[in-house]
Image: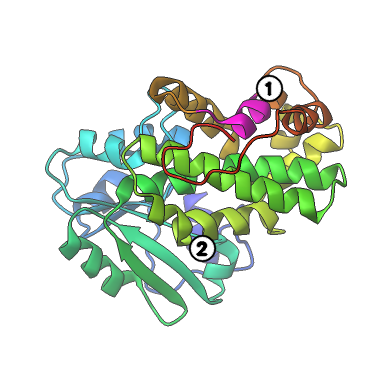
């Protein structure tokens, strides 16, 4: 694969119609590339993140995670995994409403680079941002990472609703109540509620829950058509991050006493044989309650 990409200047599996910039060097030696780098960007599916950073040697350059998810085994955020691997190395995260195809084509995109180190965030904003790729900085690493991870779970739900033909009202309800679930968990983990109203929260949630390029929404629609999770996932090389993320979300919610009704039903569909129609009926059958969007809200 490395030789094919080097020769063709295109990735035949992912974005085969996008040519790599001439300045990009292709290598299969990640450790050597990282050792010589002034910035290490890790952009792999969450289930492979720990293994990927484990193969890299000692680093002094800052690390930027562009992965949206949790480490499946310990339910840790990617920045926590990177900080554990390289104690003392500055770590930042990149998230927001960003379909890779549109970014690669230079279409206008806005995203967030988050770090507790204001200087690092500003440096990455300068180095990576452009007119077409507008970057905002944020100090709330937790909120940015949780928003980027859990929006995939809600997109599975909107995909199921769309696949069942439940209408746009239902989709809007799932997005709105999904945002409440994401915010509850983010705050319980130490994030700021305002972060979830921004690009890494609401922005990414809306894109992934409604966009035609969304892998998680597409998986939800396939499940609604009666396809099995295994068959739908095997039909594409792309990873639907919502599948492993929902397990971590529920584990963290249980640990912190947070209720995630939508995530609970999605997990039942994915892992317990419940049909998408049954899962959404369970949500509709919940007892009516008062809409409460305060930070301390525990239910939906």
| Residue 16 disc label | none
| Residue 268 disc label | 1
Question: Start and end of the magenta stretch?
Answer: 259-267
- Residue at the location (30% across, 70% down)? 125
* Viewer-closest of 90 and 246: 246
Residue 153 image position (x, y, % from top left): 60, 39
- Residue 240 seen from this side: no
In this rendering, position of residue 116 left or right of residue 131: left
User: Residue 40, relative to residue 239: is it above or below?
Assistant: below
| Between discs 1 and 2, the one toward the N terminus | 2
Of marks 1 and 2, the one in the foreground:
1
Residue 28 image position (x, y, % from top left): 39, 48
Residue 257: in magenta span: no
Quickly name the residue at label 2. Answer: 7
Disc 1 element? helix
- Residue at the location (40% across, 46% down)? 145
Residue 275 image position (x, y, % from top left): 81, 25
* Viewer-closest of 22 and 163: 163
Mark 1: few/some/many CA within 10 Å (<14, 14-19, 20+): some
Mark 2: few/some/many CA within 10 Å (<14, 14-19, 20+): few
* Viewer-closest of 206 and 282: 282
- Residue 41 seen from this side: yes
Quarter of image, res 174: top right
Residue 278 image position (x, y, % from top left): 81, 26
Disc 2 element? helix
């Amino acid at each position: 694969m490395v030789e094919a990409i080097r020769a063709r200047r295109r990735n035949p599996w992912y974005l085969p119609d996008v040519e790599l910039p001439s300045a990009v060097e292709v290598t299969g030696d990640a450790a050597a590339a990282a050792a010589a780098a002034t910035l290490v960007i890790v952009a792999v599916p969450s289930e492979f993140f720990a293994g990927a950073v484990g193969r890299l040697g000692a680093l002094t350059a800052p690390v930027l995670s562009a992965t949206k998810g949790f480490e499946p085994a310990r339910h840790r955020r990617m920045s926590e995994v990177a900080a554990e691997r390289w104690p003392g190395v500055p770590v930042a995260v990149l998230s927001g409403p960003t379909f890779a195809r549109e970014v690669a084509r230079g279409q206008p995109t806005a995203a967030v680079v988050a770090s507790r180190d204001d200087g690092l965030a500003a440096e990455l904003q300068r180095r990576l941002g452009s007119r077409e790729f507008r970057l905002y900085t944020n100090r709330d690493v937790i909120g940015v990472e949780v928003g980027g991870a859990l929006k995939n779970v809600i997109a599975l739900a909107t995909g199921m609703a769309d696949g069942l033909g439940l209408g746009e009202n239902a989709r809007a309800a799932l997005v709105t109540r999904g945002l409440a679930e994401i915010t509850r968990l983010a705050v319980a983990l130490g994030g700021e509620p305002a972060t979830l109203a921004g690009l890494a929260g609401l922005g990414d949630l809306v894109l992934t829950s409604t966009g035609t390029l969304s892998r998680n929404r597409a998986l939800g629609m396939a499940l609604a058509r009666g396809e099995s999770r295994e068959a739908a996932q095997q039909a594409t090389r792309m990873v639907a991050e919502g599948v492993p993320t929902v397990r971590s979300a529920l584990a963290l919610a249980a640990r912190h006493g947070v209720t995630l009704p939508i995530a609970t039903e999605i997990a039942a569909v994915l892992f317990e044989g419940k049909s998408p129609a049954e899962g959404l009926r369970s949500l509709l059958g919940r007892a009516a309650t008062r809409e409460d969007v305060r930070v301390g809200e525990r239910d939906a």
